[in-house]
Image (spheres, rainbow, N blue to C red):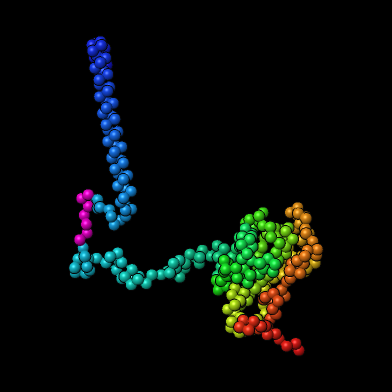
């Protein structure tokens, strides 16, 4: 309408239109400046004010506040604790506990995954990458054989036999970056992990330890301070015999000749040249192995270690 009026009025109309546009631009600029100033003030306040918390928030407008206080005849309630029971007595059930005679894992007996779950052996994982880091930071001395005692004495790994932890398993994370030549004994290892160790000229062995032996190896100093002789290691249970007698798993009860054959087979499978341990300068260290009844390298069952005098009491030969 304004444009049609200005068209009828000629030049006077054009001037009127220009004045209207200028006035409109001034109004918009003024509003934008006001908004910018308001936002800057708000941001400045936020920089100085504390964090928004429940304690510094105002209640909603027209909201009602509960004026009840106390308990019983004084007008109060039970503060969300309910009527008797665990809420008032504060004797809550442990996490995961289900009342009744049929908890979840017994209610559906056709699910077999939980069968014997409370007796299954656990093997905390150690990645090849973490093992390489421990070696690079001198937490582990690779000039000596590595076993459970060596890993626990690094200060970064722990073993809890009371929680059914039966040793360590070596996982294949970071195996492409593993470059150390070691003689290591673990409780479980995959085929790729075995290949990664033997590719560098090392030796890997899987061995079983009973719970008492694990307690001793997890903290050897504590056992030696008791002044007790070193016990024998027990043989594996029936369900673990097959694994530790298999040369493919490098089991400590396997035939050494079969292990040598499997080393060559694995090298051909993964396409690397198997180093000759016989020609290595660290041949004695690489071939060092414990007896199936032995706990520590260089210490026989029945010997007594005296930490105070730094002596070893050996059994007299009969």
Q: In which quarter of the image is residue 74?
A: bottom left
Viewer can see residue 300 = yes
Residue furthest out toward the left: 74
**Percent from the top left, x then y, of residue 66?**
22, 59
Q: Confirm whether the magenta stretch covers residue 171.
A: no
**Percent from the top left, x then y, of residue 3?**
27, 16
Residue furthest out toward the bottom: 318
As drawn, is 270 to the left or to the right of 104? right
As drawn, is 63 to the left or to the right of 189? left
Quarter of the image where the C terminus is located: bottom right
Residue furthest out toward the front: 309
Q: Quadrant of residue 293?
A: bottom right
Q: From what the image shows, is residue 288 above or below residue 191?
A: below
Q: Which one is nearer the viewer's eye here, 125 or 6?
A: 6
For image coordinates 31% across by 37% down, the residue present is 36
Q: In which quarter of the image is residue 34?
A: top left
Quarter of the image where the N terminus is located: top left
């Amino acid at each position: 309408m304004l444009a049609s009026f200005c068209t009828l009025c000629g030049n006077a109309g054009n001037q009127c239109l220009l004045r209207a546009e200028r006035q409109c631009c001034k109004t918009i600029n003024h509003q934008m400046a006001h908004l910018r100033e308001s936002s800057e003030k708000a941001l400045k306040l936020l920089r100085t004010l504390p964090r928004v918390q429940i304690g510094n928030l105002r209640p909603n407008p027209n909201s009602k506040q509960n004026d009840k206080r106390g308990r019983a005849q004084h007008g109060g309630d039970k503060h969300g604790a309910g009527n008797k029971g665990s809420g008032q007595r504060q004797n809550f059930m442990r996490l995961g506990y289900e009342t009744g005679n049929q908890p979840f894992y017994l209610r559906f007996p056709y699910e077999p995954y939980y069968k014997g779950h409370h007796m299954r052996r656990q093997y905390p994982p150690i990645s090849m990458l973490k093992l390489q880091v421990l070696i690079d930071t001198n937490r582990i001395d690779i000039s000596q054989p590595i076993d459970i005692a060596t890993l626990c004495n690094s200060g970064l790994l722990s073993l809890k036999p009371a929680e059914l932890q039966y040793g360590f398993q070596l996982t294949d994370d970071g195996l492409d970056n593993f470059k150390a030549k070691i003689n290591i004994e673990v409780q479980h290892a995959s085929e790729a992990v075995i290949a990664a160790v033997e590719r560098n000229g090392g030796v890997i062995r899987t061995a079983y330890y009973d719970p008492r032996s694990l307690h001793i190896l997890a903290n050897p100093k504590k056992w030696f301070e008791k002044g007790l002789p070193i016990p024998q290691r027990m043989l594996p249970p029936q369900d673990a015999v097959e694994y530790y007698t298999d040369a493919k798993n490098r089991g400590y009860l396997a035939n050494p000749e079969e292990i040598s054959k499997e080393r060559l087979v694995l090298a051909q499978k993964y396409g690397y040249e198997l180093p000759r341990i016989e020609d290595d300068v660290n041949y004695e260290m690489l071939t060092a192995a414990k007896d199936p009844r032995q706990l520590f390298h260089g210490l026989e069952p029945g010997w007594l270690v005296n930490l105070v005098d730094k002596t070893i009491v050996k059994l007299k030969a009969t």
